[in-house]
Amino acid sequence: MSDRAGWDAALSFGAPPHDDRLVFRGEQPAVAGQPEPLPADLPAALVAALERTGVTHLWSHQAEAIALAREGRHVGITSGTASGKTLAYTVPVLETLLTESHTRALYLAPTKALAQDQARRLHALGLGRDLRVSLVDGDTDTASRRRARIESNLVLSNPDMVHIGICPHHQRWDEWLSGLSAIIIDEAHVYRGVFGSHVAHVIRRLRRCAALYGASPQLLLASATVGNPAEAFGQLTGCAISIVDADGAPSPGRDVALWNPSLLDEATGRRASRIQEAVGLVAQLVIDDQRVICFAPGRQMVELILRGVRDELTRRAPVLTDRVEPYRAGYTPEVRRQIEARLASGALRAVIATNALELGIDIGELDCAVVVGFPGSVASLRQEWGRAGRRQRGLGLLVLGDDALDQWFARHPEALMARPVEAIALDPNNPEIRIAHLACAAAEAAVGPRDESILGVHVTDDADALVHLSPDDFAMTAAGLIWTGVDDPASRVSLRSSGNQAVTIIDSESGAVLGDVEQDRAPLTVHPGAVHLNFGERYLVTELDLEHGQAIVEPFRGDWFTVARAESQIRLLDSERDDWLGNWRVHLGEAEVTTQVVAFQRRRVDDLSVIDQRPLDLPPREYRTAALWCVRPPTDDEPSLGGLHAIEHLLAAALPLAVPCDGGDLAGLSLQLHPDTSLPTIILHETRAGGAGILRTAFAALPRIAEAAQSIAAGCPCQLGCPSCIQSFGCPSLNEPLDKALALVLLQELVG
């Protein structure tokens, strides 16, 4: 068992009086569990199976969830990490499978690795032929899928397979679907934004396919990190969900700490590298005999930290160099089991991982979780910290970056520690996504007014629109809307894009397909001359063919990267809601966006300095989406564009405090005189056509967002503006112009 002081040496290097990098250290106290007995009337075979895996009682939240599920309710479980949510949905599902021979269940995970981990746990129950488990995903061959349909009473899969493999071919699954009694949706917090909006329709289509064969499956959802579970789970499934949000599991407690790299230049806000800080911390923890997981944002950073830790250990403790490995979801179960066994035995001391492993995969007992950069939400941070200290006291350590939100947390650590988990935003009513899945549903079975109870109230109007827009692909019959096209519409719909088309990235030397990118985002990310990252390797884009959906790349070894420059025009349309934000009027509504990538900069990797700027000639993109605009009432003084632009960046930086979103989800525009308002206006808009519910969720939290934006700017020690306050790495106008002093004045008007 690790000593509680096992990480003290590593933290002491940044603590006063010698240093000030350790900006916060606190303690999450241990909690005693609230045990309850197993239900007395569970099948004897199930009780014996649970006892074989060490389960002799339940915790109170598990008992509550199981009771609700046994009553036939749809249930959502939102207890903390390592609290036994799996058992809470497994017990009622297995009870049904063991007592009703015709019943079936479907388990959905956001990653293949999580489904594989679940399969291992189920096999460990030793139920033999009473529990017939199959994995069905994109790697499953035709013969194995056929066996799953015929033999399995529990199928483990993912939303992508339901979208393209089960619903479009439901006739092959007819017997299996007729007995579908439960759908388990694990790690449900992952389904947010555009992805969540798509998955919401996939779930509805699956429920409809089951209904075609007389089944009405129960929905069981689990997530450790949802701020609005009833609303989010309801939007995801289309059903009313009974929420179990208590947590009766014991917790050994945790030390938590924030580490801020040293400030190197106060004028520019430049700080020491968070990568090097993480390298030093992980290496010291390994030397101090701690078992560590280090989360880094992206595989390239994983490789850099891994290389740095091994180099540091080679210099200081060579015997430990081979005891640090990368760990990611793409590994085979055999490789993962080997790494877990090496961790458990002490042969392996640290793993460096992407955030894919913040999900509930069991990777053994760890002492310390080091997170490099705020991962975008308190929810993700708690998930990642929760990977360590599951059975005995652990350490959760956040190494902050130099961007605005990270540095705000450095100055206000108590705000991070006390901050509640964010609300999840998704929007099943996004018209493009909704209509795309209606097309898929029409190919699966005729769609009519009778389907409104599952597919939604827009069915009739959307069906008429599809016939009008594409008469060659759809027809209206007595039974309802049917698909008459030549291919499968599901194959056209990506679950991670609001559009239906993608650009394939091809290596010109090997001919290999490296992946794809949404066509709408291709001009920003794979324009000619762009440096593209793929699994840690760097490529130079030599050609972008939007018409045929191809980007041609070649291996690249240069010491520079690229940043695209775009110009936008935004026409403000209908305002759904409006309110006062301080002295400004703020609106939520729809906007028509026209954006065009016109140039790109080449910047050096080592110091981010600009080498040159090169023009581009690419077509504009036009789309409608959700927007939020702040309008300053008429005054005698007209603010400069630099002040408005700085506030735009600050609001965007603070917005993740209210709703989780990724860097590419939002964009903005500021004008001294917008033609639609005739006043100084700051606009934030979603980058996906139709929007994903992000700004609608954020609208109610705008006062808190504005206050945080003011705090970010006022608390930053720089004079003119830096990456820790008003500069944004992804700014399409390359941070020109910006005025920090005026932004502070205008922010005072916003907060009132």
Image (cartoon, rainbow, N blue to C red):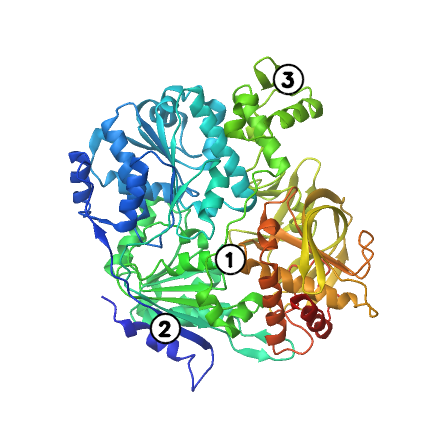
The part of the image, by quadrant, that contains residue 280 is: bottom left
At numbered mark 3, what does the secondary structure look like: helix, strand or loop?
strand
The image's mark for residue 300 is 1
Specify few, some or many for label 2: CA neighbours under 10 Å numbering under 14, 14-19, or 20 or more: many
Counting residues from the start of the chain, the first of labels 2 and 1 encountered is 2
Residue 175, given in percent of the width and then of the height, sits at 37, 19
At numbered mark 1, what does the secondary structure look like: helix, strand or loop?
helix
The residue where tag 3 is placed is 475
**Whether residue 195 can be seen here:** yes
Q: What residue is shown at x 33% (from left), y 33% (from top)?
A: 72
Q: What residue is shown at x 28% (from left), y 47% (from top)?
A: 62
Counting residues from the start of the chain, the first of labels 3 and 1 encountered is 1
Q: What residue is shown at x 70% (from left), y 26% (from top)?
A: 469
**Whether residue 555 can be seen here:** no
Residue 147, given in percent of the width and then of the height, sits at 34, 24
In the picture, the quarter occupied by the C terminus is: bottom right
In the picture as drawn, the residue positioned furthest to the top comes out as 478
Q: What residue is shown at x 66% (from left), y 25% (from top)?
A: 466
> Which residue type carries mark 2?
Gln
Mark 3 and mark 1 residues within 8 Å of each other at the beta carbon: no
Question: Could you tell me how far apart the alpha carbons at marks 3 and 1 are, in whole angstroms?
Answer: 49 Å
The residue where tag 2 is placed is 284
Above or below residue 36? Residue 725 is below
